[in-house]
């Protein structure tokens, strides 16, 4: 029993319906950052968060950038300064036809696996960031103060490559530098094992247009004689992997380290059930590098993926066109010391070397961020692990993350602080997909988890 | 000098501005047959043509079908019955952004290569079909009667695979059977050589969806482990041709005949300038079967072309998605005795044999029509060749057509009549592409050409 923590947990339980109402309000704002049409909605989400932070006593403001605003709030006192990061922007919702309801009309649904909050952004990342804010709110309500010296830093461009993030961090380095960053944008391990993510894959990406003729051609008048850029594109993309799943871009694996034996053993202990993981989405066979374990494929091996391809006619009916151009969006998940710029340059050179006469490639939107590996020497990691174990009733794990959360690396590079990644999403949350959801349990126990963690590491208690 | 023909030609010259106004009216109707949204516009174009034919004394009507209506008109007298075919529907206009103006706001433009009528459908096929109707109009104005026993048969589904055509022809076989069909949906050879098309490629097509996971996946959470259907699709499509341009579907060439020596020699005499033909659209190298001449690639060899491909995210910015499905539209130009059903079945079997675990293909919109080769024994062919030679001042040619005009084969199969394909489109008309045009010269001399042809073969003059 703890006089400090227990009343906060009780308050969280009692306030859950109101916390849910607040999250619903935020979810109703369609803050899609990739689409310029939703710029005003992103600003509205930022303003909503500023007002909410101010109501908790934070000195908060929406800070302009060339893109969407940053939300920054400072509050509380104590020796140890913690910075919390989340993002209020969400992924696009297409294909809208696959949603069961309006993605921005959130609802709590009963499902066979429990109650869920259904809406775009419910899991990634509005529901998650609100777990931290609600923990602060309960603490303030019980103790009259925030749990320690806190900075809340919420971004609005995470789903659109964070173009303003590094400049903003550089311009405000003194203000944003804390002793440790907390990031809530990851998940549980499996359905119920709390996890602290200690290594994350990086991401490199390149979008391109492959040009052939100066205009679309009729396949009756030109077919058999004229170059079809879709054919050239499919030849290049089909060569990204060999038959064993190995990426064929020269030098791709140069800076990839093998998994340390200690980590390999720890991961084996996690008993990852890939049959269930794939089975949940209608698949059965691991499709990556055939000489690697499924967890390696996801956490410690780099990938090449075509995320989008289009060219020619895709409307109703048939149009026997030889298009003037074809397009692709390709991304690479990076590990170890792989350099995003070097990987993209190698891909570009490899693709261009395959171009036949009369074709050229125009590159757009190339770039990336490296992988991150956290140091777990900071005792806050063990303290947080204990707090999570207390809340969830099973030992918390140090895990890898297949996705890319570049912010963790940026905090290290630009602000000199380590980051602790703790989140409560589940594998079936369908983030970036139609019908995204966040379990009510994730939300509720997530708030309680942060209260427990803050009780151990915030203020002067760390 | 001809008392019968000369006043008709003079009338055509004098009436050209009014003929152009009439064509403009028809071009303003956006009769896009592939898109259900434009159904009413297709009906409006049919009604416009019925009214115009009635004004010339045709007993004309818009005849309902399960799709867009057929226009059928009968008129004139004489021993030899000619049926004229054209189509009033047009191709979709996307990408609209590449048009210099509204595709359905026609205009006459001065260009460095002469005056052109700029609009969707100007060349394919409204401008062409109106050349025949205007020739009839001038004849009627001068002689008080149509030039012979004529049936005009105008379709509204040519650009969307003619689903209603065969049933309509079967249901109305007695009414539509004539002694010879005239089809105006082809082009000049080169810029100024009139041509009668005597062989046309057929078309087979197949659209399909390749399914993998049951939903879109996040490449961070699944990338490296889950099957990406875009990768599978690009592997299949990239294998359609070998490095020499040969189509790799098993059995594809089984029913392809070699070009007869006589035709090979005649085609050599046409001195096809492939460098210019490709150069006009920004290309330089013939991209088809490397052991064939450019004219063979276009007229007498079969092809496989991907006309559309799409999958994953193609909006602004990046979305690191592994999509649940990917799509393609593939078509084959057919020659000789190739059977469309057999070719599609071979393609389907070949594609499905390449599917890895967890993937399946769903087929849509498969079908096709065989190639046609006309018999030129009917003296009307030589008479028409003379008429065209008289109008254009250079010998008319018997040529091949790379495109597919299935109607020619259907007339033979279902109505037992041969077809003579004569048209006045130019290679740079950009049919099926943005900024379609029809040369004013094609329109004017096209009308005069039909008057000359009808003077030789219609009524009892044939």
Image (cartoon, coloured by chain):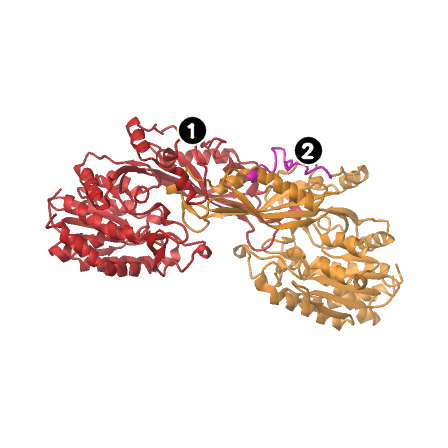
Chain colours: A red, B orange
Task: Please state the horizontal and vertical placement of residue A185, each as a whole percent of the image.
Answer: 29, 46
Residue at 69%, 52% (x, y): give it: B426
Q: Is residue A58 above or below residue B15?
A: above
The label number, if any, that marks residue A291 in the structure image: 1
Instruction: Indicate the quadrant where residue B74 lies.
Output: bottom right
Instruction: Please check the rendered image and state whether residue A69 is part of the magenta-colored stretch, yes or no.
Output: no
Compared across the picture, whether A406 is left or right of B212 comes to left
The label number, if any, that marks residue B291 in the structure image: 2
- Locate the C terminus of chain A and report the quarter of the image it occupies: top left
Find numbered disc 2 in the image and state the secondary structure of the residue it sits on.
loop
- State yes or no: discs 2 and 1 in contact (Cβ < 8 Å): no
Residues shaded magenta: B236-255
Task: Please state the horizontal and vertical placement of residue A458, each as a whole percent of the image.
Answer: 15, 46
Q: CA distance from mark 2 to mark 1?
A: 42 Å
Q: Residue furthest front?
A: A112
Residue at 51%, 39% (x, y): give it: B232
The chain carrying label 2 is: B
- Nearest the viewer among B293 and A101 is A101
Q: Pointer 2: residues within 10 angstroms few (<14), some, or many (20+)?
A: few
- Nearest the viewer among A110 and B195 is A110
């Amino acid at each position: 029993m703890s006089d400090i923590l227990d009343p906060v947990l009780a308050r969280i339980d009692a306030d859950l319906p109101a916390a849910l109402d607040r999250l619903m309000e935020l979810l109703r704002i369609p803050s899609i950052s990739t689409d310029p049409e939703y710029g005003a909605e992103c600003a509205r989400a930022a303003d909503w968060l500023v007002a909410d932070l101010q109501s908790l006593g934070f000195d908060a403001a929406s800070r302009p950038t060339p893109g969407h605003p940053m939300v920054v709030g400072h509050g509380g006192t104590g020796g140890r300064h913690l910075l919390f990061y989340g993002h209020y922007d969400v992924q696009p919702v297409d294909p809208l036809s696959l949603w069961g309801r309006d993605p921005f009309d959130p609802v709590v649904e009963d499902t066979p696996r429990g109650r869920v909050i259904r809406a775009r952004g419910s899991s990634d990342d509005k529901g998650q960031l609100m777990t931290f804010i609600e923990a602060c709110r309960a603490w303030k309500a019980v103790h009259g103060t925030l749990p320690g010296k806190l900075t809340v830093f919420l971004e609005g461009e995470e789903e659109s490559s964070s173009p303003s993030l590094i400049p903003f961090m550089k311009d405000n380095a003194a203000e944003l530098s804390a002793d440790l960053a907390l990031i809530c944008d990851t998940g549980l391990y499996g359905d119920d094992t709390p996890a602290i993510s200690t290594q994350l894959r990086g991401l490199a990406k390149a979008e391109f247009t492959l040009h052939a003729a100066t205009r679309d051609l009729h396949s009756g008048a030109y077919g058999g004689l004229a170059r079809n850029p879709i054919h050239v594109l499919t030849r290049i993309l089909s060569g990204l992997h060999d038959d064993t799943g190995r990426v064929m871009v020269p030098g791709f694996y140069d800076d990839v380290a093998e998994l340390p034996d200690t980590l390999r053993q720890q991961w084996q202990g996690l008993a990852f059930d890939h049959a269930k993981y794939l089975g949940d989405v209608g698949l059965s066979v691991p499709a990556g590098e055939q000489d690697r374990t499924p967890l390696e494929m996801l956490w410690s091996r780099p990938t090449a993926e075509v995320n989008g391809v289009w060219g020619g006619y895709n409307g109703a009916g048939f149009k026997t066109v030889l298009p003037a151009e074809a397009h692709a969006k390709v991304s690479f998940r990076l590990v170890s010391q792989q350099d995003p710029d070097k990987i993209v340059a190698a891909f570009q050179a490899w693709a261009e070397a395959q171009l036949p006469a009369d074709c050229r490639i125009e590159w757009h939107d190339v770039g990336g961020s490296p992988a991150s590996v956290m140091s777990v020497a900071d005792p806050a990691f063990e303290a947080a692990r204990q707090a999570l174990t207390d809340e969830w009733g099973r030992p918390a794990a140090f895990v890898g993350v297949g996705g890319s959360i570049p912010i963790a690396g940026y905090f290290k590079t630009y602000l000199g602080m380590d980051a602790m990644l703790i989140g409560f999403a589940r594998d079936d949350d369908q983030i970036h997909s139609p019908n995204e959801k966040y379990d009510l349990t994730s939300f509720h126990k997530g708030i309680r988890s942060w209260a427990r963690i803050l009780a151990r590491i915030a203020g002067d208690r760390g």
